[in-house]
Image (spheres, rainbow, N blue to C red):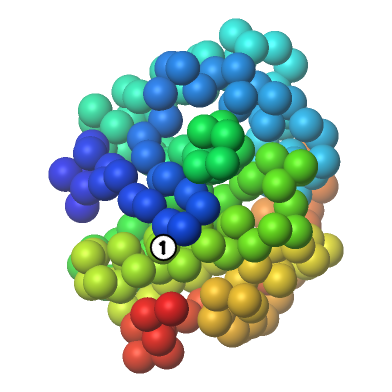
Amino acid sequence: MQIFLTKLPRLETNRLILREIQKEDAEDMFEHASNKNISKYVQWNPHKNIDETKEFINLILSNYIKGEFPAPWAIIYKKNNKFIGTIEFTQLNIENRYGEIGYAISEEYWGQGLVVEAAIEILRVGFDILYLNRIQACCMTENNQSIKVMTKIGMSCEGVLRDYSLVKGIFRDIKIFSILKKEWTNK
């Protein structure tokens, strides 16, 4: 697992390239991470300035080297070669063969099926390369866009974890979804 996290494979789909984040992504990432609509349903607050984004990129680059989390892929839109978001395994437990994914995409790219496309590729990696048996994802109960993504990639809702996560000072209910290897159809 550590080798995997220190050198994320470059992945490609019809419309996207998933690759390691680079220092050159700072401007696009700041544009993405400073948007309050994007950070509304995640743990992190919007970035206030480009220096905050550069610090985050340095953390990621350091984590790649150390094989630690976070170790996200940059989502690059092929049409304009622009960084438009991230997707990652937020958890990996190779011993028990499960993982959890998380993602965020720039608002102007919402509703185009791009996160679904990226997530299907990450599921492929999880099941076919890492030999996971279970992959899960979570979101706040009111995050309807994320719920749609999880449903479209074949995940089933397992339930609601009540007051599970303290997000920006408020306890939030979290919906948990999963897909098992035997349910994966290698979309």
86 with respect to 145 (left or right) = left
**Residue at the location (71% across, 47% down)?**
109
User: Which residue is situated farthest in the bottom direction here?
Assistant: 182
Image position of 57 with respect to 145: above or below:
above
Q: Amino acid at mark 1?
A: Glu
Nearer to us in this view, 100 or 20: 20
User: Which residue is situated farthest in the front direction here?
Assistant: 79
The C terminus - image quarter: bottom left
Residue 110 position, x and y percent, is: 74, 52
Res 85 quadrant in image = top right
Residue 67 position, x and y percent, is: 25, 37
**Residue at the location (70% across, 25% down)?**
31
Numbered-mark total: 1
Residue 52 seen in this snapshot: yes
Residue 41 position, x and y percent, is: 75, 49
Residue 70 position, x and y percent, is: 42, 39
Local SS, label 1:
helix
**Mark 1 lies on residue:** 121
Nearer to us in this view, 153 or 63: 153
Image position of 129 with respect to 56: above or below:
below
**Residue at the location (25% across, 72% down)?**
128
113 with respect to 173 (left or right) = left
Res 59 quadrant in image = top left
User: Which residue is situated farthest in the top direction here?
Assistant: 51
Image position of 56 with respect to 169: above or below:
above
Badge 1 local density, few (<14 within 10 Å), some, or many (20+)? some
Residue 89 seen in this snapshot: no
Nearer to us in this view, 64 or 161: 64
127 with respect to 179 (left or right) = left
Image position of 139 with respect to 49: above or below:
below
